[in-house]
Amino acid sequence: MSASKRKTLARLWTVVCSILLSVFTLSAQTQSSGAQPQSSQQPGSGPGSQKDAAPPEAGGPLNDSGSYAIPKANSDKQNARPAPPPAPKPTEGMPSYSISVDVPLVSVDALVLTKDGQFIPGLKKEHFRVLEDNVPQTIQSFGTTKAGYTAVLLVEFASTRYQFVADALRAAYAFTDQMEKNDYISVISYDLRPTIQVDFTNDKRAVFAALNGMRMPGFSETDLFDALYDTLDRVDRIEGRKEIILIASGLDTFSRTTYDKVLKKIKATPNVTIYTISTGFLWRNYLESRPGMGAAMRNMDFLQADNEMQTFAKMTGGRWFNPRFQAELPEDFHEISAAVRNQYTLTYRPSNAKQDGSYRKLKIELIQPGTDKPLIVRDQKGKDLKYQVISRDGYTAKHEVE
């Protein structure tokens, strides 16, 4: 090979090596710039400034010493409420029902009497005004009740003194003598406990037979409150109007039932009228004529007994009688019989629709039609008559669960 050829090949080799060296250098630089670690940080950041970095999507700083926290926004799925369950499909052949609460009608019996105890007939619906808790009510229906009655003769029969037993039996006989064919009477006597002498019957002879068997009292206790409470519980199961004729001294010696509990029972028992007849008037006169502390204390007991007997009658629209002599009994029971057979019956739907078991006070007034003025009643001679309207003091509303 000539020298010129060798020089040409040397130059060519030098150019190739230079090109190869340039390509190798460029490739190395490219690999070096693309292989930076992912943990590379922006300027101004570092391990110490990581607490100031914006938190990730979950919200809150990356450590406990972060300077701010961004709460994570709720997604649409979190904000959306769950869909209500589908309504149950009605059973085939099963009818649908709805529950409604209806306010029941209240029935009130009113007795309008003169000062002499005579029933005043001929009154009409527009003459009456019914107040429930001092709120006027709209009378739905009105009429005069004249029919047989259902009554309990509750008689004190204890071995205390003959005078009380004799008075009680005379009064019971006098009331039974007023019976008519549509009247039903039951006789219950009491001393330590109540005893049913005869159940409800319209047979006057059966009632007389029961009274004839009451001759020898067994105990001297007069548990009036227990006997009256038990009787009220019995008649509460009977539909319609009922009367209790309480013939007693009014004394209570050994009852487990308290006076307040009896009054509460009277308030809770509907459609019951109590008429009370106090016995032992002659014996009380004898005590009043005797000096001494014992007689005075006994008189106080009788005064308290009279007050209780009057309260029982007044609360239910009945009357209290305190006969002095035996001859007064037929007249007293004639008034009771007339009162039971002749009463004005009013019904209304209370404006207070709550069925909360509360006690509602009642008051019945006679007014001149179209006004609030009291009704004026005159006799056949044109003289004004004094009268009284007797009705129960109130009633207990039902509960919704009843």
Image: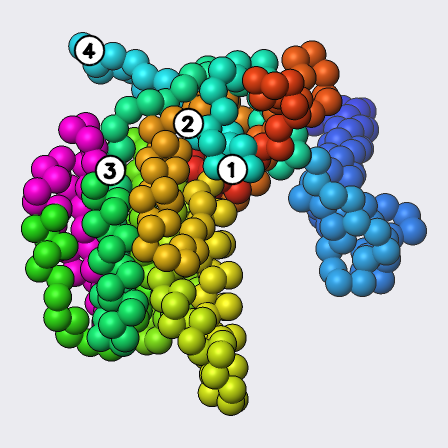
Q: Nearer the viewer, mark 4 or mark 2?
A: 2
Nearer to me, 33 or 396: 396
Q: Nearer the viewer, mark 2 or mark 3?
A: 3
Q: Position of residue 195 (x, y in %)?
A: 16, 60
Disc 1 residue type? Answer: Asp
Tell whether position 251 is magenta: no
Q: Position of residue 176 (x, y in %)?
A: 21, 43
Which residue is disc 2 drawn over?
A: 343
Disc 4: CA contacts within 10 A as few (<14), some (14-19) or many (>=20): few
- Where 296 falls versus 342 (above or below)? below
Disc 3 residue type? Answer: Gln
Q: Is residue 311 visible?
A: yes
Disc 1: CA contacts within 10 A as few (<14), some (14-19) or many (>=20): few
Q: Name the secondary structure under disc 4.
A: loop
Q: Nearer the viewer, mark 2 or mark 1?
A: 1
Mark found first going from the N terminus, 4 or 1: 4
